[in-house]
Each structure stands twice: as structure tokens, then as C-alpha cells.
Image (cartoon, rainbow, N blue to C red):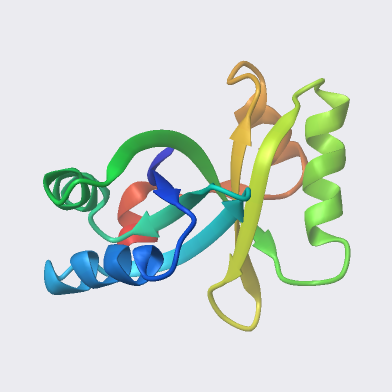
Amino acid sequence: MIDQVTVFLENSTGHLAALCKALGDAGVSMHALTVADTASYGVVRIIADEPARAYEVLNAQGFRASLTKVYAVEVADEPGGLARLLESLDTADINVEYAYCFSTNANKAVDVLRLSAAEGAEEAIAAAGCRLLTPDELYS
């Protein structure tokens, strides 16, 4: 599993820019960012090269940040690649609470998953022909 930085952010002009500037000024590189919003706040999820440092920087600047354990799964970047992974998790009765993806090169994608249960997750991921990425592989 890897650490994801999760931030509760007021949904108003300039707050996302301020968050990104804080990380940039601290020399923290983001590999992925996703925002889920409501009328009054957003949930920002970040995969960064230094998640613990990102967490510290953001909290020191008044953001409501936390670290969340998630799975980073390398999946073939081809039609049906993600479907095979999700079907395998479904067969193992493991719910996907949320997910987002990003491409690393022409052949591979990284699917970031928050799963309802850890038991059996690694086996289901392997059964789909996918592999878990380590923090060193992902953050470098």
C-alpha cells in the first residue's frame, strides 16, 4: 500500500491554487491529483513523491490534510485492463470505495484504489494479472 494525501478544501476561488503552490514551493512533486466536490467543499486526493512531507507542509499552512492508505495497481493500459481488475475484486467480494487512474507510459496505467477490505485484496489483484506498486516505484 501507498500513502495518499487527502485534503478537505473549501470550494472557493483560489484554494486549490494555494494548495498546489504550497506543495510546489516546498519542492513536493505531485504525480496525480483528483478533486471530488460539493457546493461548499472538495476532497482533494494527491499522489506525491513525498507524501509525509506534503502532509506536514499542508497542515502547517492551515489545510486539513491527512494520509490515507491506498493501493497503487499497475494495469495494462489497454481496453478492458481496468475491467479485469474490478471483476477480480468483485469476485473476491471486495468493494471499491473510490478509484482514479493515471498513465505512466504508453503501456501501463496506475489505478489508485481505496478498498473496503484488505483481506484477499493482493490475491485478487494478482489474479487479474496486475501487480501492486511499492512506494519506491511510485514516488520516484
State the image coordinates of residue 130 (x, y, percent, origin top left): 67, 50
Q: Residue at x 41, y 34 (%)?
A: 68
State the image coordinates of residue 113 (x, y, percent, origin top left): 61, 42
State the image coordinates of residue 108 (x, y, percent, origin top left): 62, 70
Q: Is 113 located above or below residue 15 in the figure?
A: above
Q: Is 88 located above or below residue 107 in the figure?
A: above
In which quadrant of the rendered view does residue 127 lie? top right
User: From the viewer's perspective, is 138 left or right of 51?
Assistant: right
Q: Residue at x 63, y 55 (%)?
A: 100
Looking at the image, how many numbered discs can be counted on the residues?
0
Q: Is 73 located above or below residue 27 in the figure?
A: above
Q: Residue furthest bottom?
A: 106
Q: Residue at x 28, y 67 (%)?
A: 18
User: From the viewer's perspective, is 49 left or right of 4?
Assistant: left
Which one is nearer the viewer's eye here, 35 or 111? 35
Which one is nearer the viewer's eye here, 18 or 82? 18
Q: Residue at x 20, y 65 (%)?
A: 22
State the image coordinates of residue 23 (x, y, percent, origin top left): 22, 65
User: From the viewer's perspective, is 111 left or right of 42?
Assistant: right
Quadrant for the C terminus in the image? bottom left
Which one is nearer the viewer's eye here, 98 or 92? 98
Q: Is 83 located above or below residue 12 in the figure?
A: above
Quadrant for the N terminus in the image? top left
